[in-house]
Image (cartoon, grey):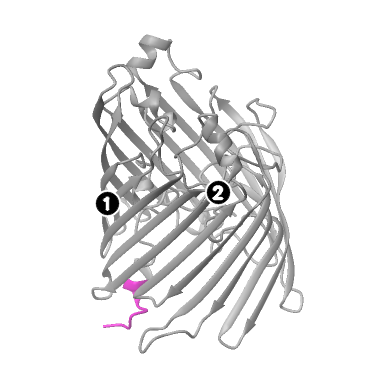
Amino acid sequence: MKSINAVAMTLLSTLFVSDVCLAATISNPDRFQHEGKLNAYLRSMYINTRISNDLIEDRFGGFPDGAELGGTGVGAILDYNSSYWAGVVGFDASLYGVAMIDSKDNGRDLFDDTDGTNGGFAKVGQGYFKLRYEGDGWNADSQIGRGRFDAGTLVTLDTRIVPGSYQGGRAHLNFTEMGIGPLPGTLGFETAYINRTSPRDREDFEHLLSQSGEEIKDLYTYGIKYDLKAIELGYDHGVSRDFNENTRYGLTLKAPLGDKAGIVLDTQYYEFEKAGRIWERDWQAGEAAYDDDATWLNINVGLLLDKLRLGVSFSETKAELTSGLGYAYFDHGDNVDGKMDAWTRSGNDFNNDGERTWQIGAEYDLSGHSLLGASLDGFKVMTIYKQGEFDATDPFSGRRTDVRERQNEYRLYYRFDEKEYSGLSVGLIYIDYRIDQDFVALVSAQPDNVVTGSEARVYLDYAF
């Protein structure tokens, strides 16, 4: 048997479910960010969401944006990743361009210029100085300027045509010789500060904003991770000034079962708290997700058996909201994306107050198989089933009513490995979501997340 750093442990480190696993990740360094070169990346995306709610249609004449949402667009990213002068200092820059082919009234975050119209745009998505240094048993790196920053409770999403960007800085510090006995270990620290944001669907860098449109001055966040390969401990904390304060605790246990199999136990606990006057204004305006605080517990077990990955997840949410049905709000603003690694977050979030959620997922790599004589090398398929239960007050009867929601999700992903098509990948996603009580959309603080419907997505990515 190989050591604990063998193939099984490497594969386990990516187990299990994320929203972007079917589309080529824009920030993937192996396929895109080549130091000292100009890198080009293309993405074409189609998203179509159809929603229905008999209560809203009968009593209010339907949805404000209609029952069909989404659009089709093409995007391009030019990334220049410089070499490091003297091995220490460098400069990176990125140009983003998005062209609209088709868009409904609600483009589902594909197109939404700051003037309120749908359309294409171009922007300097990144422009920052970078620093790095490697010492004996440690290394550090940082970025200052505008860029794709991931640290602590802050993330950059890239599940649309182009990723978002932030203005500020981030830094990582790693101590690489922190093992215990036979277990190699790394102790990592990370931090970030931002005061502007440029979301993935618009051009300008703008102030951080609360749900009700109040301006947030800035945000700081930090995280600590101790990785012993078989055991990983994590802590993240972030504060959006005068708005909210988010904390994450994580524990992951991993064990190989031979060279191509393994098991992982992943536990995460989130605490969310109001942090001042801006949250209070949101609460008074009816835009807050909870009164004072919220929690989200997520427990996952994953099993890797050669080409098959299986995952079972459980989550429980507490998010009391006096004026309606609250939810665990994990972002740091309306235009700032917060870190949420809960496996049950795929598709709809299933994070309503008092909700208990179960999910099961499976992914299979079809390499080595064929269909009608055609090789299936490069194909992966995934299916996810999720159901949650909670109760809410029916505004028409005044009674507490049991509510059940469920979701079926299917994914197909293909990455071309042939030399002449290297860098090309295709992803298909179909989601079907059902909730058995239509009134929930009228009392929920996240009405768009509790409406029966289906969604289809198609990604076509090419990294030069």
**Dot 2, crowdedness within 10 Å: few (<14), some or many (≥20)?**
some
Q: Earlier in the sequence, mark 2 or mark 1?
A: 2
Residue 208 falls left or right of residue 349? right
Q: Nearer the viewer, residue 298 or 49?
A: 298
| Mark 2 or 1: the one toward you | 2
- Say which residue label 1 marks: 314
Identified at 50% across, 43% down, the residue is: 460
The quadrant in which residue 439 appears is top left
Measured in 3D between alpha carbons, the distance from the residue under mark 2 to the one under mark 1, in whole angstroms, is: 28 Å
Residue 102 image position (x, y, % from top left) = 56, 26
In this rendering, is residue 340 above or below 3? above
Asked if the magenta segment contains residue 5, the reply would be yes
Q: Is residue 417 magenta?
A: no
Q: Residues within 10 Å of mark 1 (few under 14, many from 20)?
A: many
Determine if residue 298 is in view. yes
Mark 2 lies on residue: 275
Task: Choose top left, top right, bottom left or bottom right for residue 248.
Answer: bottom left
Answer above or below: position of 336 versus 211: below
**Residue type, mark 2 in image:** Ala
Q: Left or right: 347 with respect to 139?
A: left
Q: Where 212 sits versus 424, above or below? A: above
Q: The magenta stretch spans which residues?
A: 1-9
Q: Position of residue 179 (x, y in %)?
A: 42, 85
